[in-house]
Each structure stands twice: as C-alpha cells, then as structure tokens.
Amino acid sequence: MSRRALAVLWLVLGIAVWSGFYDIYVSRGAHEYLQKMREHELGRGPNPDMIGVMADAQRAGVQAATIWATIIVGAGWGTIILMRRQRES
C-alpha cells in the first residue's frame, strides 16, 4: 500500500474519531438538558435553557473531538514518516 493511501486512511480514521467524539458530547448535552428539566419539574432547580446547554455541549464536543482526531492523525502520519525514514536508512 502506498504512503499516500495510508495517509488518506489515517485522515479518514481521524474524521470518524472526530465525528464520534462530537456525537458523544452532543448526546451528553441532550441528556444533561433532560436531567435539568426533570429537576426543574420536581422543583429542585431553575428552568434550564436548552440553547445554552446545547451550545456548551457543542463547544466542548468540538474541542475534545479536535484534540483526539489530531492525536490520531498525527500518530498515524508520524508512523508513516518514521517508516519511510527507516526504509531509507
């Protein structure tokens, strides 16, 4: 398999990881909103703001997803570079 194909596969994996982490954080935000709404209905907390809760979840999701995807793609591309250098020596 060529280095270019491997680099593309690592990039695709990074995109999948990014999407997965983002989805996890957004679903956690939805669960958090529902929990806060149940607490409000029981008289144990203020009325939650769905836009605010979801905006916080999206922001945290973008940050975490970007960090993990960067680590995955960087490690993969770094491995490709190291393998190329090892073959050249």
Image: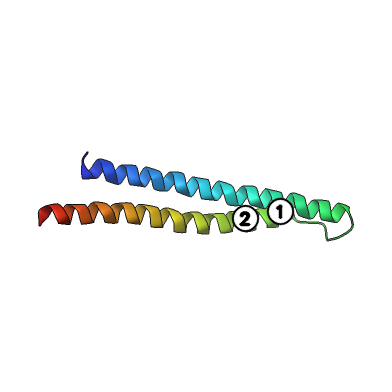
Quarter of the image containing the N terminus? top left
Residue mark closest to the camera, 2 vs 1: 1
Residue lying farthest left? 89
Quarter of the image containing the C terminus? bottom left
Q: Amino acid at mark 2?
A: Ala
Q: Position of residue 46 (x, y in %)?
A: 83, 60
Q: Residues within 10 Å of mark 2 (few under 14, many from 20)?
A: many
Residue plotted at (43% across, 46% down): 15
Q: Earlier in the sequence, mark 2 or mark 1?
A: 1
- Residue identifier under label 2: 57
Q: Residues within 10 Å of mark 1 (few under 14, many from 20)?
A: some
Question: Disc 2 and disc 1: Cα gap in Å?
Answer: 9 Å
Please report contact status of discs 2 and 1: CB closer than 8 Å, yes or no. yes
Q: Position of residue 57 (x, y in %)?
A: 62, 55
Camera-side residue of 47 and 11: 11
Residue plotted at (71% across, 53% down): 32
